[in-house]
Amino acid sequence: MNVYDSQQIISQLTPLGYELSESLDAADLIIVNTCAIREKAEQKAFSFFGRLAVLKRKKPGLIICVGGCVAQQEGRKILERFSYIDLVFGTHALKRLPEHILNISTKRRRISDVEMDNEILEFPSAGSPITNGGATGFVTIMRGCDNYCTYCVVPHVRGPEMSRKPDNIINEIRGLVDTGMQEVTLLGQNVNSYGTKEGLCSFPKLLKLVSEIDGLYRVRFTTSHPKDLSEELIFAFRDLEKLCNHIHLPVQSGSNNILKRMNRKYTRELYLEKIDKLRKISPDMAITSDVIVGFPGETEDDFKATIDLVKEVEFDSLFTFQYSDRIKAPAAKFSDKITDDIKNIRLRELLEIQEYYTKKKHRALIGSNELILVDGFSKKQDVGSGQEEFEGIYWSGRTSTNKVVNFTFGNSFHEDDISIGKIIDVKIEKALLHSLLGKPVKTKPKPFEAQKEETHAA
């Protein structure tokens, strides 16, 4: 969501004459968009703030702004702690950002704006493309959260759940498609409950509307709350051709005791029942999840229940976290904290087990042909060991199941045949922990429409 918010920030400042700079030293305006979901992210933000003091001393006219969840959480305290920061703006203040920047630049005022309102964030430019020119993009469909999990700060820094109108979402995506975007990821803290409070269409119906947009090749979404995963949404994976064969469904713990303390509002049994329904609809579906270890009161039996669930589900990948207290989250007041040593041990055990299943899933794809959407060049570290077998420039893309595939041209594929946005078949030849390596298997990519027809026929 921060990526999307950053794009909105750019769109707000462009009319003021600002453009992106590749260098902090050359910048006249620095905006730090922060996240408070984990303690580590918050610590990184404060560490970065400290580094900006040197730049301010070199260039007194430099405007430094802090936005996002840390800004919403801390407010004026940031101005008091860092005398060289000019603006703190919260999660509901994005629309007021241009006005604040003008005030700072003309009057040299220091401003804190963390006021929350009850309106969904829509910009005057809603429906206009906000894009980096890539083949993939993000669109927020709702903001805030009403679930109040006891470990989570989101409802306190993003406010109550609010859904955007379907027409605004569709128009924005159409604008992005017109710029060349072919894959969109719909964002929300709990997309499964989209439109419920406002009486709008259901999330599966919104997915259908998005899937009907001409020129759009793939649709993804995140994040889903298990308690609100409906059968209608499960069947959407069968019925909507453009919907990618992947779901991120955070479980957080495999223990009913801990799930109750987390206020997750579902049981281990219900979670496994929904996993079973998803795999009956689509046996090859990729399922990823989040797990928190060391939640207050987590016993060895509770942790074992999580390990057992991970082994039973065999997730494609996991995002794992050690529990950390968050300001305003109820669990921060729980007394039965787990020591860092125990949390470290449990996290290592969980990571080792998940690594086995991730490698297993990746190895199963060796020799298969995977249709990918080319989205750019691969990072050097993603190629891994054994790159001598795959000489040349590495391009990158993702499968429908959200697996990263890095590839080179091969003998029968010319460099001119590859570009961002092309959809190609890649034969998987090597499996790494975080990605796959392969080579294109066709001498020339097929036209976009022909590939869609072939996928539908399959």
Image (spheres, rainbow, N blue to C red):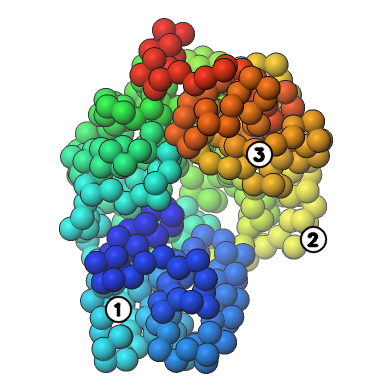
Q: CA distance from mark 3 to mark 2?
A: 43 Å
Q: Residue at x 33, y 70 (%)?
A: 18
In the rendered structure, which amino acid carries the disc numbered 3?
Answer: Ile
Residue 393: assigned label: 3
User: Mark 2 or mark 1: which is in front?
Assistant: 1
User: Mark 3 or mark 1: which is in front?
Assistant: 3
* Disc 2 target residue: 341
In the rendered structure, which amino acid carries the disc numbered 2?
Answer: Asp
Using residue 11 as the reference point, say whether residue 57 is left or right of it: right
Q: Are marks 2 and 1 in contact (CB under 8 Å)?
A: no
Residue 101: assigned label: 1
Front residue of this view, candidates 25 and 240: 25
Q: CA distance from mark 2 to mark 1?
A: 45 Å
Q: How many marks?
A: 3
Label whose residue precedes the other's in the sequence (3 or 2): 2
Using residue 248 as the reference point, say whether residue 134 is left or right of it: left
Q: Residue at x 53, y 46 (%)?
A: 260
Q: Residue at x 74, y 34 (%)?
A: 391
Label whose residue precedes the other's in the sequence (3 or 1): 1
Q: Residue at x 27, y 29 (%)?
A: 213
Q: CA distance from mark 3 to mark 1?
A: 42 Å
Q: Is residue 288 above or below residue 260?
A: above
In the rendered structure, which amino acid carries the disc numbered 1?
Answer: Ile
